[in-house]
Amino acid sequence: MASANAAAAAAMESQWAQSTTPFSPVVGKELHSTVAFVLISSALVLTGFFSLNKSPVLAPVLAIPASLAFGFGAVYLICAAGVYV
């Protein structure tokens, strides 16, 4: 019983040590506005192609990336403005 408690305590100490390491984001704060501009610009271009599209097969190929680019671009734009979500 004591060895099980010691193993659990060691596991908890290991997790605690890992949780104290600082978070480092993939995209730094200085690049948020650039990433937002690129994503929203590409979303607008894809939306334009989608509006000119007549094929129902090609519609999701244009609409899904456009909506994802606009969504992530909006989040990056909000973060670039200083409102962290």
Image (spheres, rainbow, N blue to C red):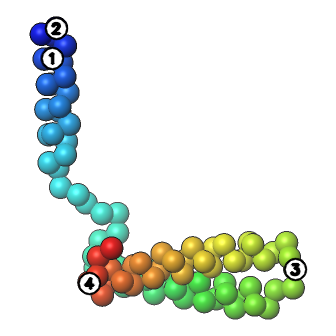
Q: Residue at x 79, y 91 (%)?
A: 52
Q: Which mark is residue 55?
A: 3
Instruction: State the residue position of label 4.
Output: 82
CB under 8 Å between discs 1 and 2: yes
Q: Is residue 6 above or below residue 74?
A: above
**Crowd tier of the residue under label 1, counting other residues whose Cα lies within 10 Å: few below 14, some 14–19, many 20 or above:** few
Q: Is residue 14 above or below residue 79?
A: above
Dividing the picture into quarters, in which one does residue 28 lie? bottom left
- The nearer-to-camera label among 3 and 2 is 2
Q: Position of residue 3 (x, y in %)?
A: 15, 10
- Precedes in sequence: disc 4 or disc 1: 1
- Precedes in sequence: disc 3 or disc 2: 2
Q: Residue at x 13, y 32 (%)?
A: 13
**Crowd tier of the residue under label 2, counting other residues whose Cα lies within 10 Å: few below 14, some 14–19, many 20 or above:** few
* Label 4 – label 3 distance at C-alpha: 40 Å
Q: Position of residue 43 (x, y in %)?
A: 59, 84
* Label 3 – label 2 distance at C-alpha: 68 Å
Q: Which mark is residue 25?
A: none
Q: Which mark is residue 5?
A: 1
Q: Position of residue 8 (x, y in %)?
A: 19, 22
As drawn, which residue projects farthest toward the right? 55
Q: Tag 4, which secondary structure?
A: loop
- Precedes in sequence: disc 2 or disc 4: 2
Q: Looking at numbered disc 1 in the image, what kind of residue is underneath it?
A: Asn
Q: Nearer the viewer, residue 6 or 14?
A: 6
Q: Residue at x 63, y 73 (%)?
A: 65
